[in-house]
Image: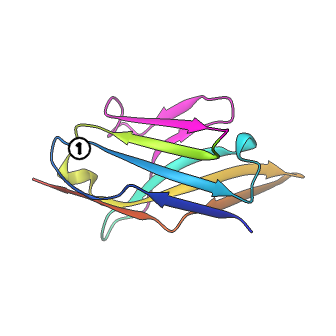
């Protein structure tokens, strides 16, 4: 059974920092591209950052330079360090795992963690 468990969401003032964690089980973590997505109230879910199995990372323009994604394969955990937070970063943040297994794309989601940034 695949599980992605996010933690670290909180209420923080604008300009503050948070670190989100996502602990994975039931997958070969090192072979998965891991990502963070977010969904603000009334909006579609959007990509925040991804990191491949080869440690290549990419970011949404809105967070580049403020957020950093990283992974620890020994701990089966992906992190999102969020600095200089803005009210518009308020959203539920979801962890995502993707891999190709026997020619099929497999995608898994966590349950989400709430990040609220007050002005």
Residue toward you, 60 or 54? 54
* Magenta highlight on residue 49: yes
Residue toward you, 43 or 85? 85
Determine the image quadrant of residue 110: bottom right
Residue 37 appears left or right of 15: right
Q: Secondary structure at mark 1?
A: loop
Q: Position of residue 112 (x, y in %)?
A: 45, 65
Q: Which residues are magenta?
A: 45-74
Residue at the right extreme of this rendering: 102
At horizontal 38% and vertical 39% (from top left) the residue drawn is: 81
* Magenta highlight on residue 118: no
Residue at the front extreme of this rendering: 75
Residue 60 appears left or right of 15: right
Determine the image quadrant of residue 73: top right
At horizontal 52% and vertical 55% (from top left) the residue drawn is: 95
Q: Position of residue 104 (x, y in %)?
A: 82, 56
Residue 48 appears left or right of 109: left
Determine the image quadrant of residue 114: bottom left
Residue assigned mark 1? 85
Quarter the N terminus occupies: bottom right
At horizontal 65% and vertical 61% (from top left) the residue drawn is: 108
Q: Position of residue 83 (x, y in %)?
A: 28, 37
Q: Position of residue 103 (x, y in %)?
A: 87, 51
Query: Would you call the spot at circle 1 few (<14 residues within 10 Å), some (14-19), or many (20 or more)?
Result: many
At horizontal 58% and vertical 54% (from top left) the residue drawn is: 23
């Amino acid at each position: 059974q695949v599980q992605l468990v996010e933690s670290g969401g909180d209420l923080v003032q604008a300009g503050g920092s948070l670190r989100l964690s996502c602990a994975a089980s039931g997958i070969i973590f090192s072979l998965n591209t891991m990502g963070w997505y977010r969904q603000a109230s009334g909006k579609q879910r959007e990509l925040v950052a991804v990191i491949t199995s080869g440690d290549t990372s990419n970011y949404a323009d809105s967070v580049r330079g403020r957020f950093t994604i990283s992974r620890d394969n020994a701990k089966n955990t992906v992190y999102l360090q969020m600095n200089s937070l803005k009210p518009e970063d308020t959203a539920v943040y979801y962890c995502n795992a993707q891999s190709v297994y026997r020619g099929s794309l497999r995608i898994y989601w966590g349950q989400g963690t709430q990040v609220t940034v007050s002005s």
